[in-house]
Image: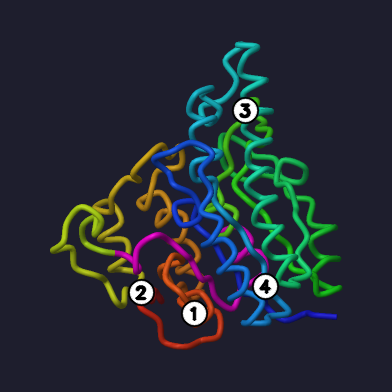
Amino acid sequence: MSDAKPVILKIGGSAITDKTGELAAKTEIINRLAEEIKRADLDNLIIVHGGGSFGHPTAAKYGIKEGYKDDPTQKLGFAETHHVMTVLNGLVMDALIWHEVPAISIAPSSCFLTDNGKIKFFDETVLKQMQKMMFTPVLYGDAVLDDKLGFTVLSGDQLVAYLAIRYKAQKIVVGVDTDGLFDADPKTNPNAKPYKHLTLAELKQIQPKLGKATGTDVTGGMAGKIAELIPVVEQGIHVTVTGATKGLSIYRALTDQSVLGTEIEK
């Protein structure tokens, strides 16, 4: 049984889907990431993945993030947002199990409640039992019920931060579609400079300058991700942000090797 502090891997929706499309999964990248996770062979790993072109367009179409507005079509939208996330999660699970990772999916909508968008309640019974048995829990950004709003979107980034603080994670690895954090969008600006190392103070300074996502993103793009990570870094948890679309980056980050990306520490 494992009581070791977990390592939390966040796989960004931008890395495993084409965010400019709709329901467009990058199955080759999903498959390679599963291979790297298997190779890293960690007993105490928790995986969280984002929604990309699955969850975000549907959530945006029905205004799920903003809450229930007495519009019956929104209930269908909530159900559809959750459903398309289970479809993307299914593709991730297919790859992990194909590569013989003992991964088990946990739907956040079944064990998390939020209050005005922030996690208020989490039933951890099943997750803790999975960890004891050394399964690999896999969660994802999801449409969840909310005490104040009726429902909302719980981002993968908020899940990562919450779980990291609650379980005193050893470290967080965040896989995105760029080689770490930059002072401008490297996809549109060839002169964008990478941040190789950031302290908490530097992270707070650059957070407002970080860009919005390309494509539809209801959770605030890179600036939103970093806002969620700041409390984690305040707790002294090390964060590595690296490119999930580049071969071996995630494997190297999970196994404490040097990696092209941004290292963040208090």
Which mark sits nearer the N-terminus, 4 or 3? 4
The residue located at (49%, 24%) in the rendering is 61
Q: Are marks 1 and 2 in contact (CB under 8 Å)?
A: yes
Among numbered discs 1 and 2, the one appearing first in the sequence: 1
Residue type at tag 4: Leu
Which secondary structure lies at badge 1?
helix
User: Is residue 176 placed above or below 77 in the rendered structure?
Assistant: below
Q: Which mark is residue 253?
A: 1
Q: Which mark is residue 59?
A: none
**In this rendering, is residue 82 above or below 195?**
above
Select label 4 or label 3 by which is in front: 4
Q: Mark 3 or 2 closer to N-term? A: 3
Q: Position of residue 265 (x, y in %)?
A: 41, 76
Which badge, 1 or 4, is on the more N-terminal residue? 4
- Secondary structure beneath dot 4 equals strand
Mark closest to the chain's N terminus, 1 or 3:
3
Give the residue at mark 2: 261
Does 169 lie within the magenta span? yes
The residues bearing labels 4 and 2 have C-alpha atoms spaced at a distance of 20 Å
Circle 3 SS class: loop
Q: Residue 45 has which mark?
A: 4
Q: Residues within 10 Å of mark 2 (few under 14, many from 20)?
A: many
Question: Which percent across, then down, holds residue 25?
Answer: 53, 48
Q: Which kind of residue does numbered mark 2 sit on? A: Gly
Residue 115 picture quarter: top right
Residue that badge 3 annotates: 148
CA distance separating discs 3 and 2:
38 Å
Q: Residue at x 60, y 11 (%)?
A: 71
**Element type at mark 2:** strand
